[in-house]
């Protein structure tokens, strides 16, 4: 029996336990940087398996290492643990027991899956060489837990390859593997516009901050239309705007928030420089002033072409094992693998990993349902075994490369 067949056999054996762990995590969701119960469950599982781990300085993150004892590659596998501030409405028997908090982005699947992947690799460690680092990360959702763990030294020893997967409401087992940028840079601004108050009967004595804000929005729309290639994915959203105090007073202050998303660093730089220049210049031209407060968001996930090519070839080669006993005939669906330019403008903090070391991020379909971040989102339990096999077989194939 090959090591790959052994891995699938162990995955089948562990599937009921994987699902049970997933149900426990799903029923007890926790928000960013507060995943203490989830982290305790992960520690308990790692101790049961026998995998050594350390607590990250970024609480409550955990880093476990499987060392084959033989020289070779270092592979990093990452799962996120946090949930969302959403009231669940699925009717599942294992639905959230925490009011207003839900695993609506599948991180319960990611965490339970990585525990099983770790157990399989640990059992088979005499048959591969190198090391595997399992990262159980807090605060992917708007917390930048990956960025903080990297700052704290997670990747001081650079991995040869980083892999992560994310569930998605697609046909069960469909794998989407894009090349290059597959998520967005996500940044935001708070813009404060200062004018001068006056009575509306004498507007010449004031500086209308609302008119300045309108002009800024028009100019930024022109920036997007004329300075950004229509072939380049990019958006600029005006999320909030507040200003003025009464209909008979020229507004002296306006505050608005902007969110920009783009797929590549060059477009990001054009947008950042343009926003700063146009906001300040427009306000000054109209007799006012403008302050900008920048909040750096997530880096784009960059699927390194060579590693992505390896992943696609591996998934094609291992398709029979991935779907064995999962589909009615044990064969992969004809359209199970989607490749090419499959990026989008969502944010994902695996981008911080991908900017440091060769990385590949894979979407895995867990059945048709409502979309991610929806109170009715569901992931089919049976699809978890596909996630397990995808990540395990990718890691093994990479570790066995000469």
Image: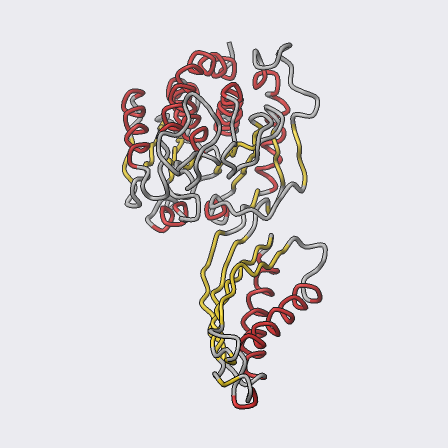
Q: Is residue 271 above or below residue 375?
A: below
State the residue at coordinates (59%, 37%): 308
Give x and y (percent) for residue 333: 67, 20
Q: Is residue 141 above or below residue 122?
A: below
Give x and y (percent) for residue 326: 57, 14
For residue 215, which quarter of the picture?
bottom right
Tell whether 33 sits left or right of 175: left
Residue 77 in view here: no
State the residue at coordinates (64%, 10%): 329
Tell whether 336 sits left or right of 210: right
Give x and y (percent) for residue 201: 55, 87
State the residue at coordinates (50%, 15%): 8
Residue 34 in view here: yes
Give x and y (percent) for residue 339: 66, 35
For residue 342, which quarter of the picture?
top right
State the residue at coordinates (49%, 64%): 189
**Image label count:** 0
Foreground: 242 or 351?
242
Q: What kind of colouring is applied to the model shown?
A: secondary structure
Foreground: 308 or 115?
115
For residue 60, which quarter of the picture?
top left
């Amino acid at each position: 029996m090959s090591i790959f067949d052994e891995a699938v056999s162990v995955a089948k054996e562990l599937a009921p336990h994987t699902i049970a762990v997933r149900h426990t995590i799903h029923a007890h969701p926790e928000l960013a940087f507060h995943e203490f119960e989830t982290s305790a469950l992960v520690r308990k599982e790692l101790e049961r398996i026998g995998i050594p781990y350390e607590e990250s300085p970024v609480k409550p993150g955990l880093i476990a290492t499987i060392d084959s004892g033989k020289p070779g590659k270092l592979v990093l596998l990452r799962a996120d643990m946090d949930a969302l501030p959403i009231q669940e409405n699925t009717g599942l028997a294992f639905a959230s027991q925490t009011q207003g908090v839900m695993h609506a982005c599948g991180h319960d699947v990611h965490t339970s899956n990585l525990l099983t992947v770790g157990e399989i690799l640990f059992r088979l460690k005499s048959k591969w060489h190198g090391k595997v680092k399992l990262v159980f990360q807090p605060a992917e959702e708007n917390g930048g837990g990956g960025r903080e763990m990297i700052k704290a030294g997670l990747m001081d020893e650079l991995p040869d390859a980083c892999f992560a997967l994310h569930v998605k409401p697609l046909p069960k087992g469909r794998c989407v593997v894009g090349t290059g940028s597959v998520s967005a840079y996500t940044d935001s601004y708070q813009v404060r516009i200062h004018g001068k108050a006056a009575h509306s009967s004498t507007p010449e004595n004031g500086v209308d901050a609302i008119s300045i804000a309108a002009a800024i929005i028009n100019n930024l729309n022109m920036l997007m239309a004329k300075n950004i290639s229509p072939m380049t994915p990019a958006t600029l959203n005006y999320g909030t705007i507040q200003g003025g105090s009464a209909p008979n007073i020229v507004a002296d202050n306006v505050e608005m928030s902007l969110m920009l998303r783009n797929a590549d660093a060059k477009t990001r730089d054009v947008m950042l420089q343009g926003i700063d220049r146009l906001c300040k210049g427009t306000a000054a031209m109209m007799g006012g002033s403008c302050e900008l407060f920048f909040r750096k968001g997530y880096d784009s996930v960059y699927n390194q072409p060579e590693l992505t090519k390896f992943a696609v070839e591996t998934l094609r080669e291992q398709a029979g094992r991935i779907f064995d006993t999962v589909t009615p005939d044990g064969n992969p669906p004809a359209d199970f693998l989607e490749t090419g330019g499959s990026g989008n403008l969502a944010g994902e903090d695996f981008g911080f990993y991908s900017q440091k070391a060769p990385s590949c991020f894979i979407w895995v379909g867990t059945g048709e349902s409502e979309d991610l971040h929806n109170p009715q989102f569901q992931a089919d339990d049976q699809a978890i075994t596909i996630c397990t096999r995808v990540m395990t077989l990718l890691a093994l194939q990479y570790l066995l490369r000469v």
